[in-house]
Image (cartoon, rainbow, N blue to C red):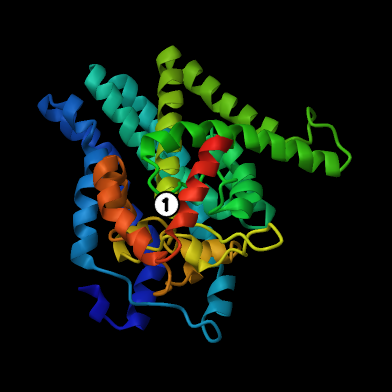
Amino acid sequence: MIEKVDPQTIMKVKKGGYLLFWAVMLPLVPLTAWIGVSNGTQDYWAWGLYGFIFGIIPILDYIIGKDPSNPDELTEVPALSEEKLYRIYTIVMGFVWIGVLYFAGYVFMNNDYYLLGKLGWIVSIGTVGGIIAINLGHELIHKDPKIENWMGGLLLSTVTYAGFKVEHVRGHHVHVSTPDDASSSRYDQGLYSFLPKAFVRNFKNAWVLEKKYLERKGKKNISIHNELIWWYAISLGFAVSFGLIWGWMGVLFFIGQSFFAALALEIINYIEHYGLHRRELENGRYERVTPAHSWNSNYFLTNVLLFQLQRHSDHHAYAKRRYQVLRHYDESPQLPGGYAAMYVLAMVPPLWKKIMNPRVAAYYEGEMDQLFREGKRVNNIA
């Protein structure tokens, strides 16, 4: 539907759309809590946000269609990159998320949930945390200005996933689409095989990378210079504050939503690089990262909700590009749906493989032997 709209009009819509869509989405947090209490079905409505994100949004994605706009590299990108409004959006949304998190803790403690409702609310808020805290944190940790970089760390601390700040930039972006990267899923690897390895290896690798970084600077690992210690200490501070306000159940809520936010991230990681590989060169190194090494998705609604994270091919090729100027590449491997739809698909491995394996095979026609070889190698490393 939207493909027929003038691209310049779409660019103008997106300028306000990044906050406008969240101005519509975020009221669903108190709304689903209030509706459930008002008619005694709070245990079911606790899952409302989760159902909306993975039930309604995929349908709207297909109805609205794909984004036809791409900023012109010479005439539009320089000015768009410097426009401060886009930076303000991410900072404002960061503080909004912190407010939402504490409000959600209040709802958790006061909505008289049974076990089903408590679990549903934790899953729903954790998923929103994955979308806002980790997604925006991801955007900000790639930026050089301290206020943005630190806000990225703070957002990741709200979901106890500070290791991502170090491992993603110094690990994932260096080794993406190679067997050395735990966040790059291999061809024919199921989601539930991928997740535990990603969680464990990425956590360990963050500390290893930070230690090496400090050693190069001539500083001690266990010291005030280790940023992971600071960020995890802030996470502990959040947990303590929830405990002081609501007791051990408040701490349980904070830890629970942190887990499901991190889970959402790793499922998206699984989707973004499934089956893609960088060719190994004669000198033993891998070819440089290009837009061919990440799956791209250009569905308009999810793209705006995720601050254009779905234009992931451009992000990996040019990691410091700001979200508002990320480009769509027709020649990149294309997902058959937006991230919300693909998230649901990934949770059913046989269906995921039935749909995605032929796409990988078509993209790497004549190179499938290399895919299987790398798949065996990553299993040995793990």
The residue drawn where x is 32% and y is 24% is: 108
The residue drawn where x is 38% and y is 76% is: 12
Q: Which residue is mark 1?
A: 274
- Left or right, 197 with respect to 119, comes to right
- Judging depth in this view, the residue of 326 and 25 nearest the camera is 326
The residue drawn where x is 14% and y is 29% is: 38
Residue 131: percent from the left, percent from the top? 40, 46
* Pointer 1 local density, CA inside 10 Å: few below 14, some 14–19, many at least 20: many
Q: Residue farthest to the right?
A: 218
The residue drawn where x is 28% and y is 47% is: 352
- Judging depth in this view, the residue of 38 and 4 nearest the camera is 4
Residue 186: percent from the left, percent from the top? 45, 47
Residue 184: percent from the left, percent from the top? 50, 48
**379 versus 169 height, above or below:** above
On-image quarter of the N terminus? bottom left
Camera sees residue 127: yes
On-image quarter of the C terminus? top right
Residue 15: percent from the left, percent from the top? 41, 69
**121 versus 338 height, above or below:** above
Q: In which image quadrant can residue 223 be found?
A: top right
Q: How many marks?
A: 1
- Judging depth in this view, the residue of 179 and 125 nearest the camera is 179
- Left or right, 263 with respect to 230, comes to left
Numbered disc 1: secondary structure = loop
Kind of residue at disc 1: Tyr
